[in-house]
Image (tube, rainbow, N blue to C red):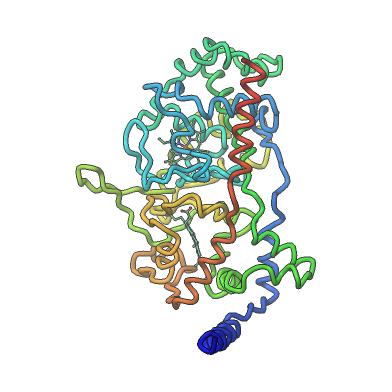
C-alpha cells in the first residue's frame, strides 16, 4: 500500500510537471485568421460548370459503377479502385502505383479532390473529368482506348442503362469520343461526392470561432502546439492553406528529382515543368471543345499559364486531410510515414532548393517535442473513413438497383 502511495505521488508529480510543459499555446491574430480559413468543414458544394454532369445524382451512380469497373482496362483486371481504394483514403498504400506497368508516382488520395484546381502531382489536368481520361488511356495504367470504352458503354446492358439515366434523355454522346467524355464526366461527378469526414481539428476550429473554451479544451494540447507551429514558425500554412490545406499551387520542397527504375536506371521527373506542356497539348483541357462553360473564370489560368525554368521539380501541394490513411507520402512515395515527412522539413537540404524558387522553406531544426506536436496536429486532420466508404458501397448498390 505504502509503495503504491509513493508510486501515485510520483506519478502525480510527473503528470503535473508534464501538464505545465504542455500548456496550450496562445494564438496571435495572424494565426487565428489562418485557423478560421481552414474551414468551414464540410465545404459547400459548387458544381463544375464545365461538366454538365457535375452534381447530377444519376451521373454519380454511373460514376460509382465505372470507378470499380476493371473492364475499362486493356487486360480487364485494373479498375480506378485498384489504385484508389476506399479504406486507404482512395490511394493504394504503395510508394509508386502499379498498373499494367510500374508508374513514376504515388497515387494520391481522392477525398476532397473537388476542391482542387489542378489534378495530378504535376497538374497536367485542369478538371476532375479530364483527370479521369488519362489513366484510362495511358498504356502504363489501364491501357484502354476510346473505342474500347465506347464499346463497353454501348454493349454492356447495365452500363448502357446507367449511361442513359446519366444523360437524362439528352443526346450527350453520339460518337466514341463523346462516350469516353460522358464516362469521364460521370467519374468526376462521383469523385465530387468524396469528402473527408469532420475531424477533431474542425471541432476545435469551430470552438475557437465561437469562443467556446470548454470545447477548445477537448482538443489535445499537443495538437494545439502543433497547430501553432504549423501556422507560425513552421510556415506550413503558406502552402498548406484553406479548408483542404492546399493553396492549389506547385512548389519545390527539396526532394530528389530522380526516379529509379526496376533495372536501376535513374530518370528525372520534371514535375510541373512537363505538367504544363501536357496540360497545353491535352485536347480535353478547358480550352478544348468539350468544356461546357468556356466563358468561366476557370479557363483563364489554363490560357495564361506558361512554362518557366523554376517549374522544374515543382509538385502540387497536396491536401493534408485524411492523411493517416494515405501513406506513403510525397509524389514519389519516398517518405514511408508522417514522421519522415516532418523530419524532411526539419532537416531540409537548402542547397537542393532552387536559387530562384522557394524562399519560404528553411530547415526548421525541430526538437523531439516539436516533432511530436506537429504529428499530433497532422493526425487530428483525419477521422474514420467508414462513412465515405459506406457511401461508395451504397451508391454502387443504388446503381445495381436502378439498372439490374
Ligand atoms: C495504376 C494505378 C492507377 C489507376 C488504375 C488509376 N489511377 Fe488515378 N492516379 C494514380 C496516380 C499514380 C496518380 C498521380 C498521377 C500523376 O501525378 O501524374 C493518380 C492521380 C489521379 C487523380 C488526380 C488527383 C489529384 O489529387 O491530383 C485523379 C482525379 C485520379 N487519379 C482518378 C482516377 C480515376 C477516375 C481512375 C479510373 C478511370 C484512376 N484514377 C485510375 C494511379 C492510378
Ligand atoms: C513551399 C510550400 C510548402 C511548405 C512551406 C510546406 N509544404 Fe508540405 N508540401 C508541399 C508540397 C509541394 C508537397 C508535395 C511535395 C512532393 O511530393 O514533391 C508537400 C507535401 C507534404 C506532405 C505529404 C502529403 C502527402 O499526401 O504526400 C505533408 C504531410 C506536408 N507537406 C506537411 C507539411 C508541414 C507539416 C509543413 C510545415 C513544417 C509543410 N508541409 C510546409 C509544399 C509545402
x and y, in percent, of residue 392 in the image: 60, 34
Residue 173 position in % (x across, y down): 60, 16
Q: Quadrant of residue 188?
A: top right
* Residue 294 percent across, percent down from the top left: 65, 33
- Image height check: is 315 above or below 163? below
Task: Depth check: give the residue in front, 124 or 88.
Answer: 88
Q: Residue at x 46, y 19 (%)?
A: 146
- The residue under the point 57% across, 82% down is 15
Instruction: Measuring from the top left, give residue 283's x and y in whole percent.
Output: 50, 29
Quarter of the image for residue 352 reads bottom left
Q: Please name the residue shown 61% across and 33% down the image.
A: 190
Q: Looking at the rendering, in which quadrant would you find the C terminus?
A: top right
Relative to 324, say whether 171 is above or below: above
Residue 161, located in which quarter of the rendered image?
top right
Side (left or right) of 27 relative to 13: right
Query: Can residue 14 be seen at all in this image of the molecule?
Result: no
| Residue placed most toward the observer, 110 or 174 | 110
Is residue 336 placed above or below 112 in the rendered structure? below
Dividing the image into 4 quarters, which one contains the N terminus? bottom right
Q: Residue furthest front?
A: 1
| Count of labels in the image | 0
Amino acid at each position: 500500500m505504502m509503495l503504491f502511495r509513493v508510486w501515485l505521488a510520483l506519478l502525480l508529480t510527473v503528470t503535473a510537471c508534464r501538464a505545465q510543459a504542455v500548456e496550450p499555446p496562445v494564438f496571435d491574430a495572424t494565426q487565428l485568421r489562418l485557423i478560421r480559413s481552414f474551414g468551414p468543414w464540410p465545404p459547400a458544394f459548387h458544381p463544375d460548370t464545365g461538366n454538365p454532369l457535375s452534381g447530377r445524382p444519376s451521373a454519380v451512380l454511373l460514376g460509382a459503377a465505372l470507378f470499380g469497373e476493371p473492364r475499362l482496362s486493356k487486360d480487364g483486371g485494373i479498375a480506378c479502385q485498384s489504385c484508389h481504394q476506399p479504406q486507404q483514403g482512395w490511394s493504394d498504400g504503395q510508394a509508386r502505383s502499379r498498373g499494367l506497368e510500374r508508374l513514376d508516382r504515388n497515387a494520391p488520395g481522392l477525398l476532397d479532390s473537388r476542391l482542387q484546381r489542378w489534378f495530378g502531382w504535376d497538374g497536367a489536368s485542369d478538371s476532375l473529368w479530364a483527370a479521369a481520361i488519362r489513366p484510362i488511356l495511358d498504356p502504363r495504367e489501364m491501357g484502354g482506348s476510346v473505342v474500347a470504352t465506347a464499346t463497353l458503354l454501348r454493349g454492356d446492358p447495365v452500363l448502357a442503362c446507367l449511361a442513359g439515366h446519366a444523360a437524362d434523355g439528352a443526346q450527350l454522346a453520339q460518337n466514341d469520343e463523346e462516350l469516353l467524355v460522358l464516362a469521364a464526366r460521370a467519374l468526376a461527378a462521383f469523385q465530387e461526392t468524396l469528402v473527408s469526414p469532420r475531424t477533431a481539428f474542425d471541432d476545435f476550429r469551430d470552438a475557437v470561432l465561437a469562443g467556446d473554451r470548454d470545447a477548445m479544451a477537448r482538443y489535445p494540447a499537443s495538437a494545439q502546439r502543433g497547430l501553432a507551429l504549423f501556422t507560425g514558425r513552421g510556415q506550413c500554412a503558406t502552402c498548406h492553406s484553406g479548408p483542404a490545406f492546399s493553396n492549389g499551387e506547385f512548389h519545390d520542397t527539396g526532394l530528389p528529382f530522380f526516379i529509379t527504375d526496376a533495372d536501376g536506371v535513374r530518370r528525372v521527373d520534371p514535375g510541373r515543368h512537363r505538367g504544363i506542356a501536357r496540360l497545353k497539348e491535352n485536347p480535353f483541357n478547358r480550352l478544348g471543345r468539350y468544356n461546357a462553360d468556356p466563358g468561366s473564370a476557370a479557363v483563364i489560368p489554363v490560357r495564361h499559364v506558361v512554362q518557366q525554368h523554376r517549374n522544374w521539380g515543382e509538385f502540387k501541394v497536396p491536401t493534408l486531410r485524411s492523411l493517416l490513411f494515405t501513406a506513403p507520402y510525397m509524389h514519389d512515395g519516398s517518405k514511408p510515414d508522417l514522421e519522415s515527412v516532418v523530419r524532411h522539413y526539419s532537416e531540409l537540404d537548402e542547397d537542393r532548393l532552387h536559387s530562384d524558387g522557394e524562399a519560404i522553406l528553411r530547415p526548421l531544426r525541430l526538437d523531439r517535442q516539436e516533432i511530436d506536436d506537429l504529428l499530433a496536429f497532422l493526425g487530428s486532420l483525419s477521422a474514420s473513413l467508414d462513412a465515405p466508404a459506406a457511401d461508395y458501397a451504397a451508391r454502387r448498390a443504388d446503381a445495381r438497383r436502378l439498372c439490374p
